[in-house]
Image (spheres, coloured by chain):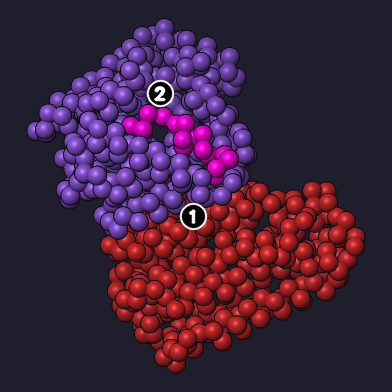
Chain colours: A purple, B red
Amino acid sequence: MTALETVLEAGGPAVERLMQQVERRMESVTAHHGPALAGYSSETINAGGKRLRPLLVCLTAGVPPPESEGLVRAAVAVELVHAATLVHDDVLDGSALRRGRPTVVAAGGRKMATATGDLLFARAFAELAGGRSAASVRVLSRASSELALGELMQRADAFDGAIGVERYLERCRLKTAVLFRAACELGALAGGEPCSSLAPFGEQIGLAFQILDDVLDVSGPPERTGKPRGADLLDGTVTLPLIEARSRDPDLRALEVRSVRSEGEAAAVCDRIAATGALDAVKERALALVVDAKASLPALPERQRAALEVVANGVVERYA
Amino acid sequence: MTALETVLEAGGPAVERLMQQVERRMESVTAHHGPALAGYSSETINAGGKRLRPLLVCLTAGVPPPESEGLVRAAVAVELVHAATLVHDDVLDGSALRRGRPTVVAAGGRKMATATGDLLFARAFAELAGGRSAASVRVLSRASSELALGELMQRADAFDGAIGVERYLERCRLKTAVLFRAACELGALAGGEPCSSLAPFGEQIGLAFQILDDVLDVSGPPERTGKPRGADLLDGTVTLPLIEARSRDPDLRALEVRSVRSEGEAAAVCDRIAATGALDAVKERALALVVDAKASLPALPERQRAALEVVANGVVERYA
């Protein structure tokens, strides 16, 4: 049973119906905005991922969630912003593969991919604005600004081996956790709450998600991640596994990030990082964040708590 | 006297005060969102342009316009979306210069520029959402989607010498005119009108703006446009001057757009286009659109009509 199936079981039929509406609406966004969007991004959007963010939107609105169009719109908007950032990230990284399939930039070129990302981004706000909630637009636009600031921070810090843990965590918060947080805030708004007591939960599991993603970049295997090991290194992105490993291995401490140029060299550095035991330490840190996140959940109806815990576990299961 | 000064005089002190607020707010957006945004895009945003779109927002809200924060936010949002598209367009075109200054992509690289454009885009929606009008967000997100569709259309049609007038005009509408239209719609909303009788006026002068921009790409001079002549050709973008010239000159009809590779070759094709008289014909077409746009203005207070006509003339003056 997949994590999604488990959470749908825990959340009950109303959650399942909502998520089906989300899927249909995502498909219609790609189908109705020109051949380029349909041709290049349908895989990114439709075939993509575990829908963790839309699930968070639905589950934070209440379990069973209210069956409102605004809730579906919010869930779709969050996933479209996520898809837009994936498409642009692949342009920035020049990635050829995502989940083992060609990226939009690989299939259509970087011009097509940049415009496609812009379109997905604009459609996200169009979805949300159709729901007539200016508060929701504020939440999503703030999160979107922070996602872009996270990207800018990553570019500004590229190839800088002196990046420390605090700055790394702030970057993870900006480039990933804020959208998980926004998903919770949007769910709360759609459920009629002006602010979300679940926002810290969303932010913490988002942080864990990014940290584990960075572990996967080092550990691979490529067949599973759909990209070569050490892709972050080749891109100049210094992540927690390397930061942690540098504190354990003087040779890694002396390593110039910029000197790693080939996939073979990157894989060798990944092996060296793994040999220090840093990956287990970093993984523990992420798992502890998830444990904390679950423990910090406020008093909730049992079914809602159970479903949210399944989502939190889903973040970890990616790694297991 | 610049066109802006003329319109400020025609619009009166309330328009001038509003536009000063718009400038201050634009400056604060670049100043308060990280060193990368401040460093790379402040020229694009602060030094940039004639503010035609914010002016349209202010003037369509009424003359004198209501001195509301929502109106300033709408004007800033439109200009930020415009700035975001400029930054991304320069990435897509690989342009080194804009208005004779280094582009964001030239100064910071394409990764930085892509993320900077995303940030400006997100800030645009954040500005608008702060004004609590979901209808305004709908207008801007629809226009933003269409701008991206226009880019995608341009990429899909690149190097296609068979592009006809209708398709060219539809592309101009999507990539340029919709934002002029949205400016009018946002102004109407901020002025308390649910829909704008001035939207067709905005769309027509936007169309004229793009057509004249395409004439300038062929006519130059580079000292004035800040980019080499024929930059569109080198990018594979077939515009009305070439379409019109092809109907007049069999050699141009036989030209493979893809065969034009150097700035020298592009300049030679530009000369050939100019020699057919196509530039005058295309320019006439744009001027006729502006005349029509002014003639189509509904009954308005005299001061508002005069100010809007100055803006329409400003679109033409770029060319003169």
The answer, for residue B3, to whether it is visible in the render is no
Nearest the eye: B73 or B35: B73
Q: Position of residue A163 (x, y in %)?
A: 39, 29
Q: Chain of mark 2?
A: A
- The question of residue B42 being in magenta is answered with no
Extreme residue in the bottom direction? B302
Q: Is residue B243 left or right of residue A257?
A: right
Instruction: Identify which residue is drawn at 27% across, 62% down.
Output: B132
Instruction: Identify which residue is drawn at 22% across, 30% down.
Output: A12
Instruction: Identify which residue is drawn at 77% across, 72% down.
Output: B279
Q: Secondary structure at mark 1?
A: helix
Question: Quarter holding the C terminus of chain B?
Answer: bottom right
Q: Is residue A217 left or right of residue B276?
A: left
Task: Identify the residue under disc 2.
Answer: A214
- The question of residue A44 being in magenta is answered with yes
Q: Is residue A62 left or right of residue B155?
A: left
The disc placed on residue B145 is 1
The three-letter code of the residue at mark 2 reads Asp
Q: Secondary structure at mark 2?
A: helix
Label 2: few (<14), some (14–19) or many (≥20) C-alpha neighbours in 10 Å? many
Look at the image and give the residue range highlighted in magenta. Answer: A37-53
